[in-house]
Image: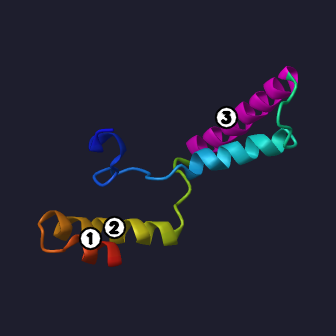
Amino acid sequence: FDLSLWNYFDFKSSRTNNSSEGWHHRLNTDLNHVIHPHFYMFIRAIQNDYAYNSAISSRHTAIGAIPPRKRLFVNRNARLHDLENPYKQQTLTLEEYLEK
């Protein structure tokens, strides 16, 4: 595979699938962790998920903001971005970049 397909170095948004994992866990919980749910049970779970997401979206629209990210992740992301420029300018070696 070409490097550009899987490399997230210059990607400015989320670099993880945590949101997908959270959704999958919530869906599994709604389905009572049944491996092969009945079709209508699955439809009900999708409808519940839609209602949940609609309520969250309405709340964010009413407030006018999304909830803040956890400080830990904000700090980690800022640290990665601070290390990115010296690495790109080759004033920081790959080993130094990976150590920090």
- The vertical placement of 78 against 27, above or below, is below
What SS does tag 2 mark?
helix
Q: Position of residue 19 (x, y in %)?
A: 58, 48
Residue 45 drawn above or below residue 78: above
Determine which residue is flagged by label 2: 80
Q: Residues within 10 Å of mark 3 (few under 14, many from 20)?
A: few
Residue that protrudes farthest toward the top in the picture: 39
Q: Nearer the viewer, residue 78 or 68?
A: 78
Amino acid, disc 2: Leu
Instruction: Please rate how many residues cluster around mark 1, counting C-alpha atoms within 10 Å: few if below 14, some from 14 to 19, many from 20.
Output: some
Mark 1 highlights which residue? 83
Q: Count residues near mark 2 (Cα–Cα under 10 Å), then give few for <14, some for 14-19, many for 20+.
A: few
Count the marks: how many? Answer: 3
Residue in the image at 86% along x and 21% along y: 40
The residue segment tinted magenta is 39-62
Task: State the residue position of label 3.
Answer: 54
* Magenta-colored stretch includes residue 60: yes
N-terminal label among 1 and 3: 3
Which residue corresponds to the image point at 57% horizontal and 41% vertical from the top-left? 61
Q: Position of residue 16 (x, y in %)?
A: 49, 52
Q: Secondary structure at mark 3?
A: helix
In the image, is 26 to the left or to the right of 94? right
Of the 4 image quadrants, the one containing the N terminus is top left
- Residue contact between numbered discs 2 and 1, judged by CB atoms under 8 Å: yes
SS class of the residue under badge 1? helix
Q: Earlier in the sequence, mark 3 or mark 2?
A: 3
Q: Nearer the viewer, residue 77 or 64?
A: 77
Which amino acid lies under the numbered mark 3 shown in the image of this protein? Ser
Indicate the position of residue 28 as horizontal and vertical percent values: 78, 42
Question: Residue drawn at (63%, 48%), measured in percent from left and top?
Answer: 21
